[in-house]
Image (cartoon, rainbow, N blue to C red):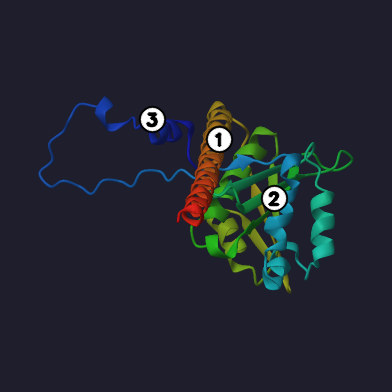
Amino acid sequence: MLTAKALLKASLGLGSFLKAPMVEAQPRAAAPAPVMVPIRSIGPRERDRIAQHLLSLKPHDRYLRFGYAASDEQVQRYVDGLDFDRDELFGIYNRRLDLIAMAHLAFAPADQHKDCAEFGVSVAEHARGRGYGARLFERAVVVARNEGIGMLFIHALSENAAMLKIARNAGATVVRSGSESEAHLQLPVATFDSRMSEIALEHYAQVDFQLKTRAKQFWAFLADLQEIRSGVRAARDQSSP
């Protein structure tokens, strides 16, 4: 998980030049810079994008995400029933503002244990292999810590190797029971660094989304302008003797 200091270094380019230069007999390979993946909080206005993302999953992917072969109607019912006031949802968008990966951090209802939450994630087929699931899990851990959650649960099918790998890599305990597995990760208490990390991550994602929105609007404008020019050119060609 990226700390607040690492986020500032990655976004501002700070770090090595603040220290006195050192000469080494054998230069070492530079450490890779932290990879910043803009992960944006999702609100109720994004229901259509959420539905489009989940409905685009293949039957087996839906089976892994929900634990059963969810039909279109069941997926839509899940989307319609999302409680944005209680839970937290996060998403990763491409340049066309398509939702290509999303996570659902579900908090316990008021009449149940308030220090527990459950994590679920889905990634579009063409966007897999880039570590988006792990990044979304890291973001969920930060938010859960800051909300006072002490235990984060992941309920997944035992064949969902990708999800269970994310849990194990985070240090979660995985218990398998037949075709299903349950992982739980004990979270440390919130700190100033974890709160600053959440603020920095959300700000970075919001700026990224705004830039992508403006870029999409600009390209749409150019496409319309090109269409108008093509129409004028065609009309001119037809009217010429």
Q: With 104 as the anchor, is 109 left or right in this view?
A: right
Q: What element carries label 1?
A: helix
Q: Distance between the residues labelled 3 and 1?
A: 19 Å
Above/below status of 134 relative to 160: above
Q: Residues within 10 Å of mark 1 (few under 14, many from 20)?
A: few
Earlier sequence position, callout 2 versus callout 3:
3
Closer to us: 19 or 101: 101
Q: How far apart are marks 2 and 3 (CA)?
A: 31 Å
Q: How far apart are marks 1 and 2 (CA)?
A: 16 Å
Q: Mark 2 points at which residue?
A: 49
Q: Which amino acid does label 1 sit on?
A: Gln
Q: What element carries label 2?
A: helix
Expressed as whole percent of the image width and height from the top left, the position of residue 104 reads 70, 49
Expressed as whole percent of the image width and height from the top left, the position of residue 196 reads 54, 28
Q: Mark 3 points at which residue?
A: 12
Judged by depth in the image, the label closer to the viewer, 3 or 1, is: 1
Q: Name the residue under label 1.
A: 210
Closer to us: 136 or 123: 123
Q: Are marks 2 and 3 in contact (CB under 8 Å)?
A: no
Question: What's the residue at 69%, 44% (across, down)?
Answer: 89
